[in-house]
Image: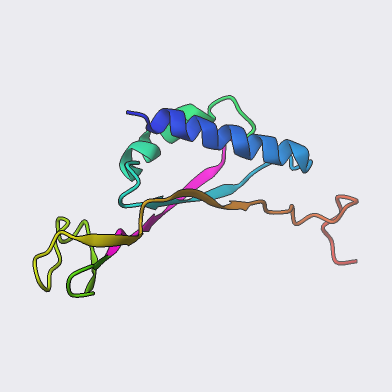
Amino acid sequence: MHELGVIMTVCDRVIAFAKENNIPRVDEIVLEIGEGSGIISEYVEKVWPAAIRHTMMENTKLIIETVPGMAMCEDCFEIYNVVENKGCCPQCGSQVKEILSGTDFNIKEIHIYEDEASPSGDTSNA
């Protein structure tokens, strides 16, 4: 399972970004995981708690967006989901294709929510 190593790298990059930008807390991160990336989302979710334990991201929520593995058949030009169709064009049955999407793995967003308190700490509406 290489997902732990991948997620440890993600954490290192997010922590470095936070330190460079004086961000004390990261509330959420959004990862894009392509269906054809070789990264299994369920494994990422399982290793996430171990990867963030004892770091500034310990309470960071993980959000995963799955990017469909889409391809275009080079014989009939049908665009289809490679995973759902087991690599074959549903129109003509060809396996000759150009991959269009779904092979990437990206840190899409880093969410930081500011405290609702005013700079003085006073939250009243005086």
**What residue is rendered at 12% in x and 64% in y?**
94
- Above or below, 93 against 31 in this view is below
Q: Nearer the viewer, residue 9 or 41?
A: 9
Q: Quadrant of the N terminus?
A: top left
- Classify 81 as above or below 49: below
Q: Nearer the viewer, residue 57 or 75?
A: 75
**Main secondary-structure element of the magenta-colored stretch:** strand
Q: Nearer the viewer, residue 16 or 92?
A: 92
Hey, which quadrant is residue 21 in on the image? top right
Name the residue at 37% across, 29% down: 2
- Residue 77, x across and y down, in percent: 23, 74
Residue at the image point whose x is 44% and y is 28% from the top: 5
Looking at the image, can residue 58 be seen?
Answer: no
Q: Is residue 41 visible?
A: yes
Q: Position of residue 24 (x, y in %)?
A: 73, 39
Is residue 80 inside the magenta stretch?
no
Residue at coordinates 49% horizontally, 49% vertically from top-left?
106
Quadrant in the picture for the C terminus: bottom right
Q: Is residue 54 left or right of residue 88?
A: right
Q: Residue furthest top?
A: 54
Position of residue 24 in the picture relative to residue 123 (left or right)? left
| Residue 67 is covered by the magenta coloring | yes
Which quadrant would residue 93 be assigned to in this image? bottom left
Position of 65 with respect to 18 (left or right) is left
Q: Which residues are magenta?
A: 57-71
Q: Position of residue 79 (x, y in %)?
A: 25, 72
Q: Nearer the viewer, residue 72 or 50?
A: 72
